[in-house]
Amino acid sequence: MLQRLSRELPRLRRCGPRLASTLPSNQAQPGEEEVSATVKRIRAELATDKQKLKWRTPIGDRPEDWSSKLKLFANNEQTSDFILMMQRPIDISPSNVREWWKNRGDRIERHMQQFIPERHKILGAELAAAHFILYRGGAAKFLNDSRWHRATEDGEFNLPNKFDARFKVEALRCDNMTLYYEGLENIRSLGSLKFLSFHNVKTFDDWCLDRISGGGYPNLEVLDLSGTDITINGLSCLYRLPTLKLLILDDSKATLEMELASAMLEEAIPNLKIVGADAIHTET
């Protein structure tokens, strides 16, 4: 090892000046001061531009702005409804107050019609659907029972308060009810249901019909959609009900598009017959 080092030492001495020139130095080379100044200036301009591109701080959130103590109750969730409300001018006219009160009632009713799993666990799907419909003014008929069950004027009805396998819903009348899309979740999975009527349910639209078509009614034969807000777009989803035999509409020949949609639906479901509401409701 020592002999090898002694042989390499003269060669390292000859390369010494050249190696020293390649070592890093803390001294700034000519022109480096100008480059560093340019880089600093560009960085400062970029930081200024980023500050300009930031969203404007809302009035009341800046430290220098005055804010009321009632800010504690302000809505921090800037939803689309809140933004639309803030963009509209304040209107306390009687008509606008009535409209606000009506919309408030609709929101409450939608919330009250939401699916409650605990109710279905206690009653089962059949009795839970009957309780839901009777409580809101509808009627229900059970298998092997010729009676139509309805609530009294006080809103009371005689049905079991817990699951009873003997009660199988065969027919439901939701006529003239205020029934929302959220409430339809409560009348699903009824294996014995054969008759279902939404006559004059003004809140029933294509979205509601789509939920009904996939609601789990393997034996549904009669469906009344007269007086509802459905269109030809909603009728196309009824192919999911192959056992349907009678479909009641306001007028299946009202327009050429409706007549064509009805014909295609009858073609898709061989035993189906589509009739107008006048032929059914005037006879009854």
Image: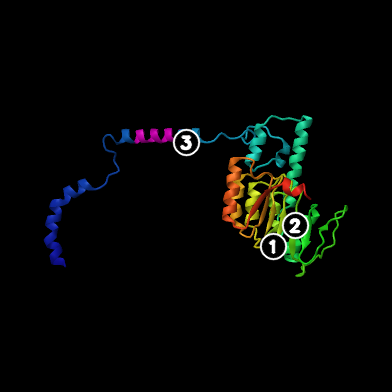
Instruction: Kindly state the secondary structure of the residue where label 1 is placed.
Output: loop
Q: Which amino acid is tagged 1?
A: Leu
Instruction: Please give the range of residues in magenta.
Output: 36-48
Write the residue at 61% across / 40% down. Answer: 255
> Would you place residue 58 above or below residue 133 in this image?
above
Tell whether 131 sits left or right of 247: right
Write the residue at 73% across / 45% down. Answer: 278
Please state the horizontal and vertical placement of residue 276, each as a whole percent of the image.
69, 47
Q: Which amino acid is tagged 2?
A: Leu
Q: Quadrant of the N terminus?
A: bottom left
Mark nearest the camera among 3 and 1 is 1
Q: In the rendered image, which residue does mark 2 sit on? A: 172
Q: In the rendered image, which residue does mark 1 sit on? A: 190
Mark nearest the camera among 2 and 3 is 2
Rendered image coloring scheme:
rainbow
Q: Which amino acid is tagged 3?
A: Lys
How far apart, in angstroms, are the residues tagged by discs 2 and 3?
63 Å
Q: Which mark is residue 221?
A: none
Q: In the rendered image, which residue does mark 3 sit on? A: 50
Q: Point out the tag, 2 or 1, that comes first from the N-terminus.
A: 2
Of the pair 79 and 115, the residue shown nearer to us: 115
Tell whether 193 sits left or right of 158: left
Instruction: Kindly state the secondary structure of the residue where label 3 is placed.
Output: helix
